[in-house]
Image (cartoon, rainbow, N blue to C red):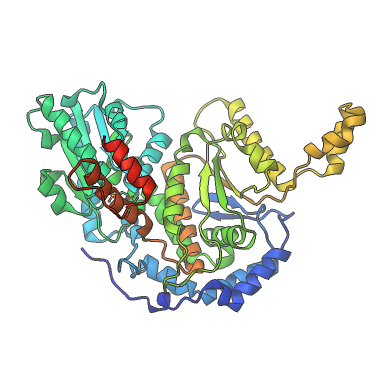
Amino acid sequence: MNAPTQALSFLHAMRPLPELPEWQAFCQAAHTADQYTFDLRCLKAAGIQVDLSGQRHSAQLSHAGQALLHAREFDNARAGLLDGGLVNTTEQRAAWHSALRTPAPIVGVAKERERMNEFVRVADSERRWRNIVHIGIGGSDWGVRLSLAAFGYRRSWRQVRFLANIDGHALEHALSGLDPHDTLIVIASKSFTTTETLQNGQRALEWLQAAGVPHPYEQIVAVTARPDTAAAWGIPQRHIFRFWDWVGGRFSLWSAVSLTTALAVSADVVAGMLAGAAAMDQHFQEAPIALNVPVQMALAGIVNRSVLGYGSLNISPYDFRLGNLVPYIQQLDMESLGKSITLDGEPVGVPTGPAVWGLAGTDAQHTFYQWLHQGSDGAPVDFIICQQADHDNKEHHRLLMANCLAQREALMRGKTYEQALEECRQSGAGEEAEQLARHRVHSGGRPNTLIVLPRLTPFALGALLALYEHKIFVQGLIWGINPFDQWGVEYGKVLAGGIMDELAGAKPIQDSHDASTTHWIRTFKN
Ligand code: F6P
């Protein structure tokens, strides 16, 4: 099944940003805009409230942002993305993950969705698969971990182990203590060529065989865009769930890669996430620019990265269940925007995708918030919190919300020397007050966004993930880069293959290595 393949020729005619008069105007407006707005600036999309009051804002900046988007043919680009156009120009592919979550999907998508649900129904009715080992890496792993931690944190009768890393310790950890006779192995890999995944899959197969499982391949399921390769690997056709080339690996959560979540929590969770993401797609498609949440978040991110020069973006989910949101967004953002060449092969000319990092609050406060408050660099922060918790401990939730709001306010407003001095004097610092006060100054004006979910429902999480996807797409468009390829990662994979052969003695150590790499290949080989 192929996606429509309209060529989007304008994507190839992207002048580097510094050459655009609209970019100059945008930069100028960003420099003179208020550091944060005194009036509330809160937008809403798919039930999520996004408070952008902590970002640079002015009427002039807003107009300049619109002009910049216009210069980049935003309307055409968005239509191209959502209609399955060839937006991934370096791989001549669509990036049509939105087609996986639309309420009325094309036939092939609906069929795979139904096959997945039927698999879950049968497994549940037979009460099979007490254990699931989910094998996959990157986009074939993080989304499932995220949704499972979000909705399976109370644990179900099925136990899920994740196996992503090639490290043999990870393999031992994943399989130890499981009963091979009641374990389903889910191998998720878009390409079905990823070394880690195939090696781990092979070890899992051997583990089933060694335990005397009568039909080991019957206990393995594949989710892939290469069904023929999975079949050649030995997996029965009815255990192969497919998706398509036009779904990027980091967007494959919306495919049957979520089978593990459906088994471990429920198919309703997966359906809810799809519905939430579809609602965000609709918002992205229809909302005017000034109210379009992914677009406004993208513009704020461009100001922070390319105008103000912040090198990173901190993600602080104030929800224990959303801890895995950090690596999820990390892959989504950094694999998409970690590029410095335009679609035409020219240098972008401004700093692009930030390093994304973070930790769930309030652990984050006791780990790196000092750096955020008073470090020389600082970073914009995305605070994410649920208005309503799913436990009964109201006091805990109030404390969580208070901490989130307080950290944000401190980062935004800061503390002047005069305020700090007054504080020191009142606490009886005496002669040392002036000296001490200097240490208590917060510069303030740190950019931030507060994202409030009504509750952590599958719908809300789906919408949140799609919000970030679209934000990243808009940023890629403004920077003029392709957010859908990942050639940098591919290069390392090729080199690893060669070094692997050298370590195993399958080929001599090549002269082409640098002295240090040669030294370590020799050392490790011996
Ligand atoms: O890290 C590179 C990458 O290609 C990611 O984009 C992808 O999520 C991951 O490897 C796994 O790829 P696959 O699903 O093909 O095994």
**Of the pair 515 and 159, the residue shown nearer to us:** 515
* Residue 241 higher or lower than 8, as above or below: above
Residue 484 percent coordinates (x, y): 38, 61
Residue plotted at (35% across, 66% down)? 88
- Could you tell whether 243 is left or right of 218 in the image? right
Quarter of the image for residue 78 reads bottom left
Residue 62 drawn at (x, y percent) = 64, 67
Q: Taking the image as drawn, is residue 174 in sight?
A: yes
Observer-nearest of 223 and 526 = 526
Query: Which residue corresponds to the image point at 33% horizontal and 27% vertical from the top-left?
Result: 156
- Does 364 sit above or below residue 331? above
Residue at x-position 15% and y-position 34%: 205
Above/below status of 429 relative to 106: above
Q: Is residue 362 left or right of residue 171?
A: right
Q: Decide if residue 315 is on the left or right side of residue 170.
A: right
* Coordinates of residue 509 in the picture (x, y in percent): 25, 48
- Which corner quadrant holds the N terminus? bottom left
| 471 and 30: which is toward the camera | 30
In which quadrant of the rendered view does residue 171 lie? top left
Q: Residue at x 56, y 25 (%)?
A: 393
Furthest residue in direction right, as rendered: 431
